[in-house]
Amino acid sequence: MKANVKISIEELNGKGFINSLAEQGSSNHKKAIITHYLHNLDNGVAKHFKKEATSALKEFVSYKNQEDHESLAVEDALQHLLFEVNDVPFPTPDNYTFKFIDLFAGIGGFRLAMQNLGGKCVFTSEWDKEAQRTYRANFGEVPFGDITKEQTKKFIPDGFDVLCAGFPCQAFSIAGKRGGFEDTRGTLFFDVAEIIKKKQPKAIFLENVKGLKNHDKGKTLATILNVLRNDLNYFVPDPQILNAKDFGVPQNRERIFIVGCRKDLGINEFEYPKPLNMKVSFSKIKEKKPVGTRYYLSTQYLQTLHNHKNRHASKGNGFGFEIIPDNGIANAVVCGGMGRERNLVIDHRITDFTPETKIKGEVNREGIRKMTPREWARLQGFPDNFIIPVADASAYKQFGNSVAVPAIQATAMQLLKTIKIKILK
């Protein structure tokens, strides 16, 4: 199909609308506009997307009978397309009680937690194309791209309650002694702060790596807090480092959480969630059935890992691969580096040692394998009906970059209670 060929309603029904747009070369930006419009047809937010969404729809929708009115074609198309964007594992909850936006969304860890509490996502952005693909498969919505661009920011609606963002950790060029709004220019935090300043949500919820606390000798965090508290006028309690293992998943993952409430709400205290009294271990999330040989290490690669670990051990370092016992807790899942090798497991259920891919050596007979992407998903608190539509390499990256959903949800629940928003059970 050529890029400029229109598609009929009948063809849309057969192919699936978003996939049809992809075949025609439609940009993800247009798909984001259309899916955001469809997701907000029942509320006032749709007006922010209507003009551009209608224009985009007209590019691709036509009746085979050209006598039919163009506006009727678009209207009929909307009725058909609504089913597609809602027929997903995690649709917007009925009778939602608050609205939020999802920045640096990744694959939707924040969104999953907020929807579980009764939230309606009215805007989301994520630049990574593979992550956008996973996000759409699960939520029926294509995220907007680069949040630093005005063409993206202009689609952020007014009137949402909570801003969620897992922004990257970056150093600031601090001109003054304290560091303020202008000092953060050129960083992604500046874009978050700019959105907060313009939209004035009731609450903000930011997540970052534990290292933010001491980044640039503490100047980075000090600047962030100064901007939020003084420049943007939010009550922001001292950030807290929470560990995923304290909230029902067997992963030792520490992250810093920063929450804030608009000062005119009269809030001056906040209590972070307490750890759950729950014993968790890898056996809780281990694959119930034997997994393919592609997850088992080759003898040669295993020897390379042993050599690497021994070299570091001789220098007094504790670097190297690690095997997580069934009754143990996984190390933090991260993309790159030794992310997978620090979370190897023993699984003797393998019966066929024939390699599924080309490897050097043979499949090891010690039962040593990598965790599967689904196991990583479970370590982050994603339910098993969460769709993984991408190749393993992308899936590991996406879950490694994601948030631990249970820790996010526990904190969000406290935040919503603080600003007196009803939580759906």
Image (tube, helix red, strand yellow):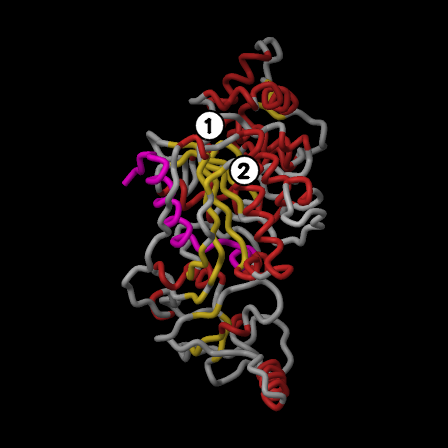
The residues colored magenta run: 398-425
| N-term mark: 2 or 1 | 1
Give the quarter of the figure containing the C terminus.
top left
Residue 412 on the magenta span: yes
At label 2, the amino acid type is Thr
Question: CA–CA distance between discs 2 and 1?
Answer: 18 Å
Q: Residue at x 42, y 53 (%)?
A: 382
| In this view, 110 is above or below 287 | above
Which residue does the numbered mark 2 point to in the structure image?
Answer: 124
* Pick the front one: 340 or 192: 192
Residue 82's disc number: 1
At label 1, the amino acid type is Leu
Q: Which residue is most to the front?
A: 177
Give the quarter of the figure containing the N terminus.
top right
* Pick the front one: 189 or 140: 189
Dot 2 falls on a residue whose secondary structure is strand
Q: Residue at x 58, y 29 (%)?
A: 198
Q: Quadrant of residue 118?
A: top left
* Residue 294 in picture, x, y percent from top left: 54, 70
* Residue 78 in picture, x, y percent from top left: 50, 22
* Pick the front one: 342 or 133: 342
Mark 2 touching mark 1, by CB under 8 A? no
* Residue 27 in picture, x, y percent from top left: 67, 35
Dot 1 falls on a residue whose secondary structure is helix
* Pick the front one: 398 or 389: 398
Task: Specify the principal SS of the magenta part.
Answer: helix
Question: Dot 1 surroundings within 10 Å: few (below 14), some, or many (20 or more)?
Answer: some
Residue 145's disc number: none
Residue 373 on the magenta span: no
Q: Which residue is most to the bottom?
A: 314
